[in-house]
Amino acid sequence: MVRRSHRSVRVAGLAAPLGAALVVAVITYVTARMALDLFKIPGEASAIWWPTAGAVLAIMVRCPRRWWWLLLLVFAAANAMANRPLGGPVITLSYALVNVFELLVAGLLLVNRREPKSLRLHTPAEAVRFVVAFAAAIAIGSGVIALRAAIVPGAAPVHEIVAGYATTHVLGLMAFAPLLLPGVTAWRRGVAQNVEFGIVLAATVALDVWVFVEPAVIGRAFPTVLPVIWAAIRLSPWRATTISIVTCGFAAYGTSRGIGTFQDVEAISDRQVVTQMLIATVTLTTLVLVLITRHRAQLAAHVRDSEETMRVAIRDALVGMYSIRLDEGRVGELSDVNPAFASMLGYQVPELVGKNCKVLNPPADSETEAEFDAWMREFARGHPESFRRETRLFTATGDALWVEVSATRVKPTGGPPFALVQVHDLTEREHTKSLLEMMALHDALTGLPNRRLLFERLEQMLRQSERDGRLIGLLYLDLDGFKPVNDQHGHDAGDGVLVEVAHRLTQAVRSGDTVARLGGDEFAILCPQVDSAADLDHIAGRVTTAMCEPISLPDGTLVTISISIGSAIASAMGAAIGEATGAGTAGIAGIAGDEAGVAGAAMDSAVGSADELVRRADRAMYHAKRRAAGERTVASG
């Protein structure tokens, strides 16, 4: 059973090469006899056109090299049988040997052992290899022909025999050149192209009969190229080559029979040359147009594949991605949007595709919009090729969303340019950043600005004061009796007292004032716009009122906290207008001193910086702690 199985495999393995050899034998004999019987002018040394070698070469390059010895052996035998009427065995065998060398050299040069399907004629190197393969094959064959003619002299001179061989075989190879390209299969397209091919073939036959078989009319030859061009552009390489071969066959037949459009050419040699020039034109036109059409089709397929790959990559990306058209007239249009980006902004994908990218970040005014349009046009031209920036996009609900955008201009081969944009949501980063800034500039317990932020704002206000001449006031506050609350009721209760004090202070001041916790039980109130010490007295009075009510602890205990306040005012010239102090015992101490007394204290020293102003207010607050409630005093420098 096993032996029978192995025998079946061996038989199946021989079927393919034997089938290819049978095809080669049939094609060789049929085309060779056609060339000798239909394409040869009586009395001439060679046929007008010899398609045999080209047809067999198109089969060889698609077969494994291990089959070639069989194909060449069969080809030589069939060729010798077809050429037997030309003369004795020496001439017959020499023609067979010439054709074998021609095929072997061309095949070896055309097919790369490492990459058998590499010859596409897309590069100058491949074109050179193609020409060299044909030239080397014809040169080897011409050498063998010349040697045979020297050994066995014939009626025609050697140079005429060699020239005739070279011309007819070059035309034969050119006729089948489109089939030497890799990836060319026979009838792989649908019914529509088969119908179109049938119509073109019928038109070609009718036109060729009218031109090359009917009585001659001068100038008929040119229209025969039209169906050849149509087939090369519209149809597959196999179909185009078939149309080309039919035209060449009719042209060679009409000339060999002395009929058709070239019968008025008196000299037989001239008639043959004219026909061969027509065949060369037809075959070369077919090859060039097939190459161009295939190349364009491959570019289009490459663009489609690239677009599909890009579309899938964008669609399945975890980050937000979209593409923008950059072709003329549609610059800025969203051509593709992935679900991640649409979800980021609260849209559905169809709601964004086809819209201009300006919907993501509408310009503030017409001037900004014009600048944006000009920038997009420059980007479409490649200036710059890419960019990365942080910007603000707007969601479907109109909310601003900070993102980092990375855009790259892409220019695909054979397609319009576009921009590929990646979007990274910075919401989490911005939240973290804001939180860190909050922690760095605000008190963790009360949420009030801390000492650092207070000094930053105070420095800014002092600089602003130098420009507009407004006065700046500072209240320095310290809680009296806070330590017993911590000792008797615990730190949690003390923290609750601090939070409540912060809340009451915030409610008591003006909207532009800054309440800050400096640390422990010390607070400060920065008042950026005061016209006189009386304004600062008014703000301090509001603070006093806010702090009159007892504070309830978590266990229900009511405690009363007294507060001491010191104040300082800075003028536009950086001079201290004054310091007022007050002290509280059971209640809240007010700021002592009247406007004249405060002004009188200003003559002693100057405020050169924020530190100096805070120190003066701090010193005034400590003076207040040592005074009885309601006592009025003025502190000097």
Image: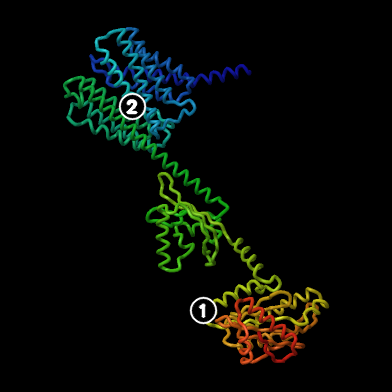
Q: Do we see residue 510 in this rendering? A: no
Q: Residues within 10 Å of mark 2 (few under 14, many from 20)?
A: many
Q: Foreground residue, 143 or 383?
A: 383
Q: Amino acid at mark 1?
A: Arg
Q: Earlier in the sequence, mark 1 or mark 2?
A: 2
Q: Is residue 512 above or below residue 232?
A: below
Q: Residue at x 70, y 87 (%)?
A: 582
Residue at screen point 34% across, 29% down: 242
Q: Left or right? Give the position of 626 relative to 292.
A: right
Residue 140 spot, x, y in % from top left: 36, 17
Residue under circle 2?
175
- Residue tagged 1: 467
Residue at the spot x=44%, y=44% of the render?
303
Camera sees residue 378: yes
Which color scheme does this rendered protein use?
rainbow
Kindly state the secondary structure of the residue where label 1 is placed: helix
Q: Position of residue 268 (x, y in %)?
A: 20, 19
The residues tagged by marks 1 and 2 sit, at their Cα atoms, a distance apart of 92 Å
Judged by depth in the image, the label closer to the viewer, 1 or 2, is 1
